[in-house]
Image (cartoon, helix red, strand yellow):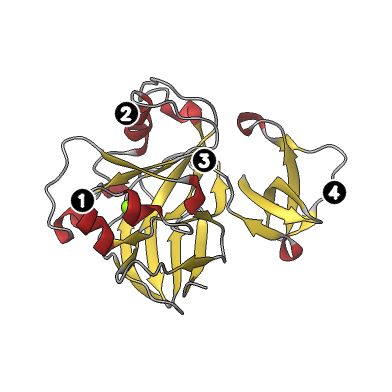
Amino acid sequence: MKIVRYKSDGRVSFGALDGVSITPLEGALDALKPARDASPARAASAELLAPIAPGKIVAVGVNYRDHALEMGRQLPEEPLLFIKPSTCVIGPGDAIIYPPQTKLMHYEGELAIVIARTASKVSQADARKHVLGYTCLNDVTARDLQRKDVQFTRGKGFDTFAPLGPVIETEIANPDNLELTTRLNGEVRQHGTTSNLIFKCDFLLSYISQIMTLLPGDVISTGTPSGVGEMKPGDTVEVEIEKIGCLRNIVAAPH
Ligand code: MG
């Protein structure tokens, strides 16, 4: 199932996207089912939002060997974690706003895990039971500020710095072998596969859940392959992951 979150007639709902129509869903995240007394919406006339509004995004740095090399960083012995605030999230088609504080804003195409049920101290073997599905995330980064500050909060934390979507795919049997492509203005800039993740999805969920409780709707962003680069106002950036779809956003100057 491809889960979307959408606005129709002023109401925000989860839905199951089936080509041209969206079937409204109701219930808890780990038990979404078709809503009673609700009629399908036409996908073309619904406004797609980010497919989830996470409480937190736990992101993983330098989790691909080729990206570690391009950044001149050593391979990590343990996952390097940081948090992106929930206020970073925007949906497909929304504008990434170029903050006036940076002179070097980068895209980072990433596979993101969406949590379905509360996960605390779960084993790798039990990790999948806590997953709703997978989506695309663009871990937008003010690279100059990230380098200047050393820690990541400012460089990774601006409003609009986490485009998410377009759908949460619930039927991915193996998240560790998905092709990921990032395009800037139609040109391929990143092309990798999640089989090259240093720390894989199940391991990450288990590892993070030993530190902090993951709540329904929380997102884990698994890191980016090599080829990160600059975006400027007027650019269009796309993160496409096999079996999920294409997350497309534009870059806009600050108002
Ligand atoms: Mg990243």
On screen, residue 1 versus residue 87, left or right, reads right
Q: Quadrant of the N terminus?
A: top right
Instruction: State the CA–CA distance, disc 3 to disc 1.
Output: 32 Å
Q: Residue at x 38, y 55 (%)?
A: 139
Dot 3 or dot 1: first in sequence order is 3
CB under 8 Å between discs 3 and 4:
no
Residue 217 in which image quadrant: top right
Residue at 44%, 54% in the rendered image: 137
Nearest to N terminus: mark 3 or mark 4: 4
Where 69 sits versus 86, above or below?
below
- Look at discs 3 and 1 and give the one toward the viewer: 1
Q: CA distance from mark 2 to mark 1?
A: 23 Å
Q: Which residue is mark 3?
A: 133
Between 18 and 38, the residue placed more toward the observer is 38
First-in-chain label (3 vs 2):
3
Distance from disc 4 to disc 1, alpha carbons, whole Å, reads 51 Å
Residue labelled with disc 2: 207
Label 2 to label 4, Cα distance in Å?
41 Å
Mark 4 sits on what residue? 39
Q: Is residue 247 above or below residue 131?
A: below
Residue 81 left/right relative to 75:
right
- The answer to whether the residue labelled 3 contacts the one labelled 1, judged by CB atoms less than 8 Å apart, is no
User: Which tag, 2 or 4, sits closer to the chain's start?
Assistant: 4
Can residue 3 be seen here? The reply is yes
Label 1: state its secondary structure: loop
Labels 3 & 2 near each other (Cβ < 8 A)? no
Relative horizontal placement of residue 72, taking residue 14 as reference (left or right): left
Q: Position of residue 141 (x, y in %)?
A: 34, 59
Q: Is residue 94 above or below residue 212?
A: below
